[in-house]
Image (tube, rainbow, N blue to C red):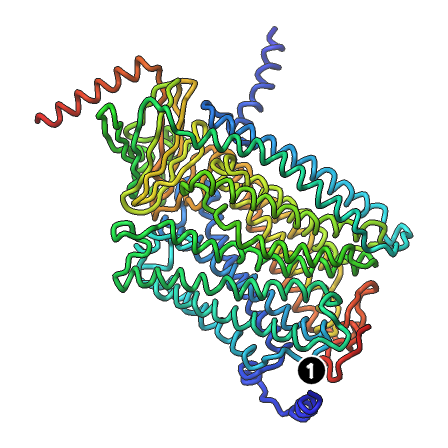
């Protein structure tokens, strides 16, 4: 091991310019690549959301034809899930895991390089389908057959890019597991790992278990379309509902892939700014593991309306409701961590607090959706759209933004402008609610999702949501400006940038050295 | 007197404008839709109470336990007792929710003893209704007035169109106070049939026959839409159900049967 590190030290004649980024095997370089890529995709997916919201500003069709509208909803989801949120979490894992466990780098650096560099090609291919004569995918990100089998020439390209994204995620997950299980500093037992490391370890297992299932489902779609099989076509003896079962067997663990690392981030930031240890560390670990295990037996709650047998509907209702227990434990633990702490409210803390409140609201609507008889009313309406945006935007995205503000001084040695950060927080939080809260109302009042035009009684709340969406989009330009300002500053940040911050990363200088820990620190 | 009428009008105006700002699920006109509404409100109120307690504690803490007020951090960080308490209490609340939910679900899925059966078939992008016993059959698609107005940059003010996007050429007619079994299937892709005031939705899937039941208690016109993405005109295949008293329904059936027979003889 030490010979290896000596070798690394000597090897500082890396290529410069573009080749540095293409050939890099360094966890920090790759982490930055992931994060910048994710930011770019966040804006690409965001622009698509704004096309949707512009069209929905008032009833009647003003800007786009229904077919293109469907391409926008489909692509917005694929890009935000696979292009923005997942790469952002992998980027954070790359930057933080080695520093948090006292390692010099990730366990499999070349694999790491490859996992990232698959992404730009996959997304170029995915986005290029929008310029096809027959257009991009328009059957929703869930790709339900038979509708998805009717699609134009984009279909094989979409499936190939999803295969590439799946491969990238699986390689990334293998790397995370190998790193965490093999490269922890002496003395850091599993139950002493930082909670962010724990949530990522569990997320990585979810990725490895669920991604191949998606690969299977979309390969069957491909052979149905091009090789004469009938897995999902009723006319050939196949079963359209089978696809939904396979898809959601992947899809529900995927939902937790998008939120477990966010739990880890919030569980790191809340104690730091409460100046008090995380309450119930053990129960946090067990709760995360229970959520992950439960995620494999709740999938059919996404398809309560397909006409399952009564026993099936009852089973999936009960298991889904059960998820509220470990999720509740997490929220209670966060509140108990804050209780009798000594809190300050810097930008990362503000985003973490908003996460707890708004994610919990998303959890409440999730509990309502779990109730099968009520779900018959909610299903495929804007109530569902409101629900999953509450858990993904002020949930996952807020956690990512909080993490960037929190670790930025460690990564760059430079502190962001706190006033601007707070303005960014308040604008983002206000607009996110203006955008998504009215969606609960129109959903309950009966507006289906994925429609380009609506009956006139839904006009008012749709207008409000559209105004909020544009405000939210503009607020994120402020985020880019803040990052730009920060990077232009001289290095001034302290090694331990936050008074209450705990963990090995804060024992390193700011900015953190290229190879993190040359000699493993001792943990007691 | 004049003043009083002005006062009443000024109070009514905001009320009528408020009607557009519908924030909740409509109350139903059938046992299943009413049961869904009641369950929805029950779970909603439970979550509101939980929310008030949790956020209340959180905001108390945010207000009182802040450094700027001189709060010193306590050192406690675990307690098996409280962990057990806040695992068990939510579990008990969930059981309390699960019991009425399961009862309602069993009631909703019981399609036995229905008096008439209507088969509903989803097409891209219209519905077909087959009254199995009464030998009536017709297609139902978006009304022409809406269809013209919904074209890209049609220049037609959709607010002036009669029930824009929620109007059809041929309404589905059902008798009130009758248990009707609805069979759902589709000919091309998956659709979903939903009229919120009458019943929750169910998918119409090629190769499958799904079933649900309705028993409409009040005569009236009820509107709904396809709720499963089914291609480019997914947003333009509404459902209109006209519920009429039984005698009127019988009349409607005989009229439409005759028409059908007449059509055949031509």
Q: Position of residue A42 (x, y in %)?
A: 54, 61
Q: Residue at x 56, y 81 (%)?
A: A21
Identify which residue, B261 or A48, lies in the foreground: B261
Residue B135 placement: quadrant? top left
Q: Residue at x 43, y 55 (%)?
A: A246
Q: Residue furthest left?
A: B266
Task: Please state if B69 lies on the left or on the right of B264 as rendered.
Answer: right
Disc 1 designates what residue?
A515
Q: Quadrant of the C terminus of chain B?
A: top left
Task: Please state if A5 lies on the left or on the right of B32 as rendered.
Answer: right
Identify which residue, B147 or A19, lies in the foreground: A19
Q: Position of residue B10 (x, y in %)?
A: 59, 19
Residue A402 placement: quadrant? bottom right
Helix, strand or loop status at disc 1: loop
Q: Residue at x 44, y 61 (%)?
A: A214
Q: Quadrant of the N terminus of chain B?
A: top right
Q: Position of residue B75 (x, y in %)?
A: 87, 56
Task: Please state if A8 lies on the left or on the right of A77 as rendered.
Answer: right
């Amino acid at each position: 091991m030490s010979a290896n590190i000596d070798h690394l030290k000597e090897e500082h004649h890396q290529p410069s310019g573009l080749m540095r980024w293409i050939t890099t095997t360094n966890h920090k370089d790759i982490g930055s690549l992931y994060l910048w890529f994710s930011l770019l995709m966040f804006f690409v997916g965001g622009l698509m959301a704004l096309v949707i919201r512009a069209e929905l500003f008032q009833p009647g069709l003003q800007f786009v034809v229904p077919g293109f509208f469907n391409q926008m909803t489909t692509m917005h989801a694929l890009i935000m899930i696979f292009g923005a949120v997942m790469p952002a979490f992998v980027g954070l894992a790359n930057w933080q895991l080695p520093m948090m466990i006292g390692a010099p780098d990730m366990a499999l650096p070349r694999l790491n390089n490859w996992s990232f560099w698959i992404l730009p090609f996959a997304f170029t291919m995915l986005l290029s389908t929008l310029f096809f004569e027959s257009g991009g995918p328009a059957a929703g990100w869930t790709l339900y057959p038979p509708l998805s089998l009717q699609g134009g020439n984009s279909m094989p390209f979409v499936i190939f890019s999803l295969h590439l994204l799946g491969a990238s995620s699986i390689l990334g997950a293998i790397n995370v597991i190998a790193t965490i299980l093999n490269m922890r500093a002496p003395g850091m037992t599993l139950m002493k790992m930082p909670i962010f490391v724990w949530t990522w370890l569990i997320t990585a297992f979810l990725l490895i278990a669920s991604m191949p299932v998606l690969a299977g489902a979309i390969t069957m779609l491909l052979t149905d379309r091009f090789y004469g099989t009938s897995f999902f076509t009723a006319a050939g003896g196949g079963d359209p509902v089978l696809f939904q079962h396979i898809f959601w067997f992947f899809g529900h663990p995927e939902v937790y892939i998008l939120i477990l690392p966010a739990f880890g981030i919030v569980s790191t930031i809340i104690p730091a700014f409460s100046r008090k240890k995380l309450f119930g560390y053990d129960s946090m670990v067990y709760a995360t593991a229970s959520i992950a295990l439960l995620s494999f037996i709740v999938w059919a709650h996404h398809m309560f309306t397909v006409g399952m047998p009564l026993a099936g509907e009852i089973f999936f209702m009960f298991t889904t409701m059960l998820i509220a227990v470990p999720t509740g434990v997490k929220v209670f633990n966060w509140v108990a961590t804050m209780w009798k702490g000594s809190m300050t409210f810097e930008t990362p803390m503000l985003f973490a607090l908003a996460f707890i409140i708004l994610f919990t609201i998303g959890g409440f609507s999730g509990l309502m959706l779990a109730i099968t008889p009520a779900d018959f009313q909610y299903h495929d309406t804007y109530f569902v759209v409101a629900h999953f945006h509450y858990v993904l935007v002020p949930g996952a995205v807020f956690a990512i933004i909080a993490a960037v503000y929190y670790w930025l001084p460690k990564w760059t040695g430079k502190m962001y402008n706190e006033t601007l950060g707070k303005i960014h927080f308040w604008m983002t939080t206000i607009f996110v609610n203006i955008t998504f809260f009215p969606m609960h109302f129109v959903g309950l009042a009966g507006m289906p999702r994925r429609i380009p035009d609506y009956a006139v009684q839904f006009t008012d709340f749709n207008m409000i949501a559209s105004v909020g969406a544009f405000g939210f989009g503009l607020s994120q330009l402020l985020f880019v400006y803040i990052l730009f300002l920060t990077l232009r500053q001289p290095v001034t940040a302290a090694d331990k940038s936050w008074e209450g911050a705990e963990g090995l990363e804060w024992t390193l200088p700011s900015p953190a050295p290229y190879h993190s820990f040359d000699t493993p620190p001792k943990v007691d | 007197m004049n003043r009083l009428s002005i006062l009443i009008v000024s109070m009514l105006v905001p009320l009528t404008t408020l009607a557009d700002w519908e924030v909740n699920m409509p109350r139903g006109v059938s046992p299943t839709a009413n049961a869904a509404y009641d369950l929805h409100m029950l779970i909603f109120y439970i979550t509101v109470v939980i929310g008030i307690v949790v956020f209340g504690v959180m905001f108390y803490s945010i207000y009182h336990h802040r450094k700027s007020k001189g709060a010193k951090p306590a050192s406690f960080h675990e307690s098996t007792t409280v962990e057990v308490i806040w695992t068990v209490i939510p579990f008990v609340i969930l059981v309390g929710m699960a019991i009425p939910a399961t009862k309602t679900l069993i009631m909703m899925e019981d399609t036995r003893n229905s008096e008439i059966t209507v088969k509903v078939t989803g097409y891209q992008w219209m519905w077909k209704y087959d009254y199995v016993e009464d030998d009536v059959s017709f297609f139902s698609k978006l009304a022409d007035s809406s269809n013209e107005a919904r074209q890209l940059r049609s220049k037609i003010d959709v607010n002036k169109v009669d029930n824009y996007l929620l109007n059809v050429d041929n309404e589905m007619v059902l008798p009130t106070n009758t248990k009707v079994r609805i069979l759902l299937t589709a000919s091309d892709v998956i659709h979903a049939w939903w009229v919120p005031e009458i019943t929750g939705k169910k998918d119409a899937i090629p190769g499958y026959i799904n079933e649900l039941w309705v028993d409409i208690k009040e005569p009236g016109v009820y509107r709904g839409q396809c709720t499963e993405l089914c291609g480019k005109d997914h947003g333009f295949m509404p459902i209109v159900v006209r519920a009429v008293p039984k005698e009127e329904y019988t009349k409607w059936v005989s009229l439409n049967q005759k028409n059908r027979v007449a059509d055949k003889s031509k």
